[in-house]
Image (cartoon, rainbow, N blue to C red):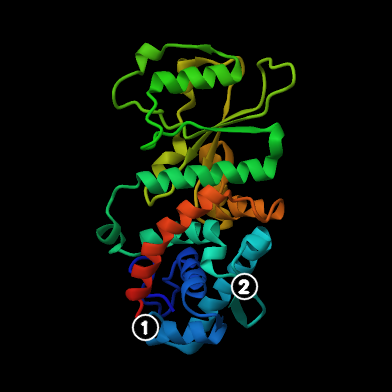
Amino acid sequence: MLAIPTKGFARSVREHNVHLDVLCDWIEGSILFGDNELSLIDIADVLIEEEIYVTEDFAREGVVNAWAELQRRLSWIGNGCAFTMDKRWIRRRAQWRDAPAYTFCILLSLAPSYDWWASEFGRDYTDQGDLFELLTKESLEAQYGSTWIVHQTGWTRTNTASLGQVVEKVAACLGEVKGRLELWNDPNAKEMGLDLLWYRPFPDNRVGIPVYLVQCASGANWKPKLHTPNLKVWRSLIQFTTTPQRAFSAPFSFSDKVFAQNCVIVDGVLLDRCRLLGASRYNDAWVSPSLRDRLIAWIEPRAEVLLRRSM
């Protein structure tokens, strides 16, 4: 199995001090990169060997909880998931190169759980963020079809548009009038938290349509971004005829309680890993060839280091 996460796993004697989401991500990563199959008992034994749990029964109870969560994830993602399950076994159903979107999201989820990750790969998350924005874009396009339009606005190395240019494009797409750009336009403004513009026009091309301003957060600092993009700021930048809604995309899988909390904070659409990868229910080949190649190139060096540290 993969190396034990350095965060989210703590010694559990009378209480489960292992975060359920981290435990599940670790199991998924272990199947994806290491073992072809693992039993519930195999995983419990490893947790005892690594002194995370003291007793076998308590360790199995923790893994049983993870089993239920993994089965739930599998039911939502469907064929986009790289594993299958029964009551006792979890098995790999696809090599990671055959499931690059799934693998990318798993690695993004695991990264905050290893304290050595940043020192190995640096703290420049520009490429990671660009890839995750593209993955979100293609997932929405696969699930909502051609009637909804998704336009990437986030700042990247290849898309260095100024805030003024972003506002100009968004206003033109929606047929809206620009607002007080001079109030917000400075060298560090970039796109003001707007990564994707997601909207559904009518054939008459008039205003008053469903519009979502999307923030894509792929890193460990995702919580402060739940409040972005700031709708008050964007209603100042553009004179929206009707108020747009906010959407938030992240590669993580949340418990029901945390998911509901995040929905309240976003006050709009929340796209977690299961919703993003659920695009496979509409089209098995929803990831474009160009994105697929870029994802594999990003994954390869990280998979090698993760496996090396697991030996």
| In the image, residue 134 above or below residue 190 | below
184 left or right of 137? left
Q: Amino acid at mark 1?
A: Glu
Residue at image coords 55%, 37%? 247
Q: Which mark is residue 304?
A: none
| Distance from Cα at disc 2 to Cα at disc 1 | 27 Å
Left-right relation of 57 to 72:
left
Image quadrant containing the C terminus: bottom left
Q: Mark 2 near mark 1, Cβ–Cβ under 8 Å? A: no
User: Residue 68: x percent and y percent?
Assistant: 61, 70
Picture disc at residue 93: 2
Residue at image position (56%, 51%) is 289
Q: Amino acid at mark 2?
A: Arg
Give percent across and percent down for residue 210. Answer: 66, 27
**Callout 2 secondary element:** loop
Q: Nearer the viewer, residue 13 or 284?
A: 284
Which quarter of the rendered picture does the N terminus lie within? bottom left
Q: Is residue 303 left or right of residue 24?
A: left
Residue drawn at point x = 55 percent, y = 54 percent? 273
Q: Is residue 79 visible?
A: yes
Q: Foreground residue, 248 or 155?
A: 155
Q: Position of residue 150 (x, y in %)?
A: 59, 34
Q: Is 46 in front, or is 291?
A: 291
Foreground mark, 2 or 1? 2
- Indicate which disc, 2 or 1, sits on the residue closer to the N terminus: 1
Q: Which residue is mark 1?
A: 50
